[in-house]
Image: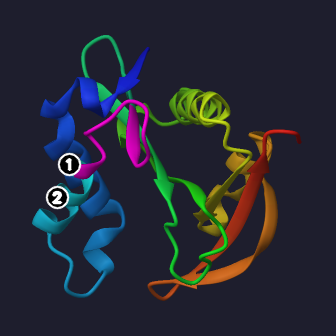
Amino acid sequence: MKISYLADCHHETDKIAQWYFDEWAHTVPGVALEDVRKNVSLRARSRYDLPLIIVAHSAVDLVAAVELKVRESKQYPEYEHWLGGVFVSKSERGKGYSSSLIDEAKKHVRQLNIHTLYLQCEQKNINLYLKQGFRVLHGATHNGVQTTIMSWNVNG
């Protein structure tokens, strides 16, 4: 597995945009694939400044991505730094890619002196994040889907 930043492999932007559209954005009224592509392109600008995307490649292919964002949720403006867009291609799930990317994202926020990271996930993914040291804060609704807001603190 090779972990890098989308800023180092811009050519993967369209693939990630398609993943995100197919997984989440297709259910949001008025959101087109091109909107998602533009959003992903913004995250390909930097290895350091948020927002950004960290990616994982197998020996031959891009297989996973994770985003670090700023103020992802308008509902919770007090939550500043977010982990999101955790996606692993279907054929590669269960091989540790998401955990490796989350570990890399946590390392990155430590280097930026960010102390707390938030995320919003569906019920089916809560255990993944609990294993990564996140804790449940409260329930929420996002685009009509029941979600859970979680946080991770550098100091535990």
The magenta stretch spans which residues?
A: 42-54
User: Residue at coordinates 59% horizontally, 76% vertically from top-left?
Assistant: 77
Residue tagged 2? 38
Q: How many marks?
A: 2
Check disc 1 and give the amino acid type: Ser
- Contact between labelled residues 1 and 2, with CB atoms less than 8 Å apart: yes
**Relative vertical location of residue 26 with respect to residue 42 in this rendering, above or below:** below
Tell me the quarter of the image containing the C terminus: top right
Q: Residues within 10 Å of mark 1 (few under 14, many from 20)?
A: many
Whether 45 is among the magenta residues is yes
Judge whether residue 85 is colored magenta: no
Q: Residues within 10 Å of mark 2 (few under 14, many from 20)?
A: some
- Corner quadrant of residue 133: top right
At x 65%, y 67%, the residue is 79
User: Which residue corresponds to the image point at 60% horizontal and 65% vertical from the top-left?
Assistant: 120
Q: Is residue 149 above or below residue 45?
A: below
**What separation in Å lies between label 2 and label 1 (alpha carbons)?**
5 Å
Secondary structure of the residue carrying numbered label 1: helix
Query: What's the magenta bit mostly, secondary-structure-wise?
Result: loop
Q: Position of residue 9 (x, y in %)?
A: 21, 26
* Left or right: 60, with 142 as reference point: left
Relative to 152, is 34 on the left or the right? Answer: left
- In the image shown, does 32 or 108 lie closer to the viewer? 108
Q: Which mark is residue 41?
A: 1
Identity of the residue drawn at 31% across and 46% down: 43
In terms of depth relative to the viewer, which is nearer, 98 or 155?
155
Quarter occupied by the N terminus: top left
Q: Amino acid at mark 2?
A: Lys
| Secondary structure at numbered mark 2 | helix
Q: Can you give x and y, in whole percent of width and height, for residue 95 in the image?
A: 53, 26
Image position, residue 42 (x, y; %): 25, 51
